[in-house]
Amino acid sequence: MTTTAGRAAAAAPPAPSGPRGASARAAWPDEGGTSFGARSWGALAVGGGALVTVAVAVPHLASHVLLATALLLLAAATAVGSVATLRGPGRAARAAAGAATATGAAVLLSAPSWGLVGTAAVTAGALTLGGAVLLGVAARTPVGRADRTTPGPWARLGVLTVGALLASAATVHGLAATEAGAHAVPHGSHGLLLDPGTHGHHG
């Protein structure tokens, strides 16, 4: 006599087997909408914050070599954690949250000694610390059980697109306020910029 459990097992569709099935499960885990949104937006935010932190620290390598180097190392760890977290849920989100928290705190605490309490430092701190909060939410959300909030492929693409636009806008705003941004050629311009005080005047 067939048991209820046996009939259920026979009726269930076979799970993918082999390397192809394993890769499919890894690429599309049963992750709820809250976890996916917090993980993807948090990773994008801390990645942008790491870029702004690098632009803030590099001009001070000569005058504050130890502090600037520490900021660059923290920013690098945050960037690596950002990329690893975007690959999928797991321990990377918790590690990236820790690195981003350290980076945000370091850039905000070191900025006054450099006279940099301005848009760039605040943007770097906001992106890294805000992203760390989102990654913390993602790290504490259980993964592995599909529910009604589990997004499909198109929903995931939409969430990633909106998050990328928001993070890139904030990142560009912060980079424009750094020393590198102040010397950047305006968008759409080509070649060298001429001094307006001398251009057009001939002896």
Image (cartoon, rainbow, N blue to C red):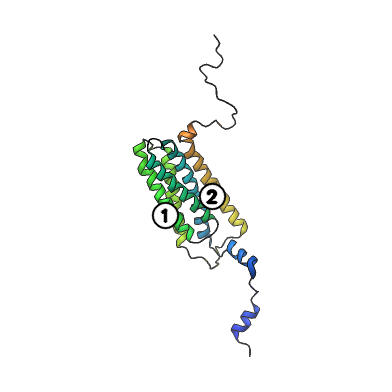
Question: Which residue is depicted at the point 52% across and 42% down?
Answer: 169
**Quadrant the C terminus occupies:** top right
Q: Name the residue under label 1.
A: 98
In this rendering, the count of numbered labels is 2
**Label 1 or label 2, whichever comes before in sequence order:** 1
Q: In this view, does 145 lie above or below 50?
A: below
Q: Is mark 1 on a helix, strand or loop?
A: helix
Residue type, numbered disc 2: Gly
> Which residue in the rendered view is the most extreme toward the bottom?
1
Instruction: Report the front residue among 17 and 15.
Output: 17
Q: How far apart are marks 1 and 2 (CA)?
A: 21 Å
Report x, y in % for residue 146.
55, 67
Q: Is residue 158 above or below residue 69?
A: below
Q: What element carries label 2?
A: helix
Question: Which residue is depicted at the point 59% across and 56% down?
Answer: 155
Q: Name the residue under label 2.
A: 163
Label 1 or label 2, whichever lies nearer to me, is 1
Counting other residues with Cα less than 10 Å from the Cα at mark 2, is it few (<14), some (14-19), or many (20 or more)?
A: many
Question: Which residue is depicted at the point 58% across and 50% down?
Answer: 161
Report x, y in % for residue 5.
59, 83
> Which residue in the rendered view is the most extreme toward the top?
203
Is 170 on the left-hand or right-hand side of 5?
left
